[in-house]
Amino acid sequence: MLRDMEFQEIYEKHSEQVYRYIFYLLRDKELSEDLTQDVFLKVYRNLKQFNHDSTIATWILKIARNLTYDYLRRKRIVSFLHMESRSYSSEEKSPEESFLTKESAEHLYISMGRLKRDYQEVLILRKINDCSIKETAEILGWTESKVQTKTARALKKLRTEMLKQEGKYDEQSKRI
């Protein structure tokens, strides 16, 4: 039987990553905290069934994804990551730099909210949660090639959305 100390170590190691993943999808602090707890309750109950086909982090994030989508289906949330538009001034940055810049985080969230759901997920997993291509493919049920393609397309689309929001998008921006 799983010792409570082992589970506590798993929770301490992975809870922040799970919370961050859910929060970036839902943009609701309390709901993200609740769903994170639900994820680890499910992990605790099913840890004996973990078959080591993937890493424990990948397995836990897949549970988080499934519970989050179950919640979205139950609540029939149509608008994914909807946030009010606001004007932000910032220097033009690549999406990668924006992930690291605190003052542009809200600007980034708004731009990400305008992306297709699969683009949002691949960016959250790859760029925010630092999952490998293989881990991301396992979590999303995609091939590694699809993860690479979607990541590249999502970054390009994110850059376009950020430029549009800043009012700096024009025909020349399409070539970036």
Image: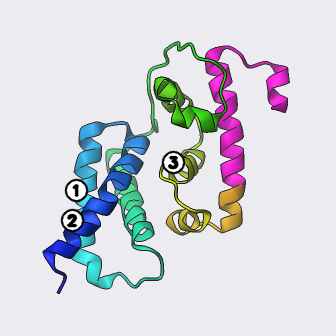
Q: Amino acid at mark 2?
A: Leu
Q: Nearer the viewer, residue 28 or 52?
A: 52
Determine crowd level at label 1: few under 14, some 14-19, many 20+ residues with C-alpha closer than 10 A. some
Label 3 secondary element: helix
Q: Quadrant of residue 48?
A: bottom left
The span picked out in magenta is 149-176
Element carrying mark 2: helix
Q: Amino acid at mark 3?
A: Ile
Q: Is residue 52 above or below residue 170?
A: below
* Percent of width and height locating residue 42: 25, 68
Mark 1, residue position:
37
> Is residue 58 magenta-colored?
no
As measured in the structure, the alpha-carbon distance from the residue carrying label 2 to the one carrying label 1 is: 6 Å
Q: Report the residue marked by disc 3.
A: 124
Residue drawn at 41 percent across, 70 percent down: 59
Pointer 2 residue: 41
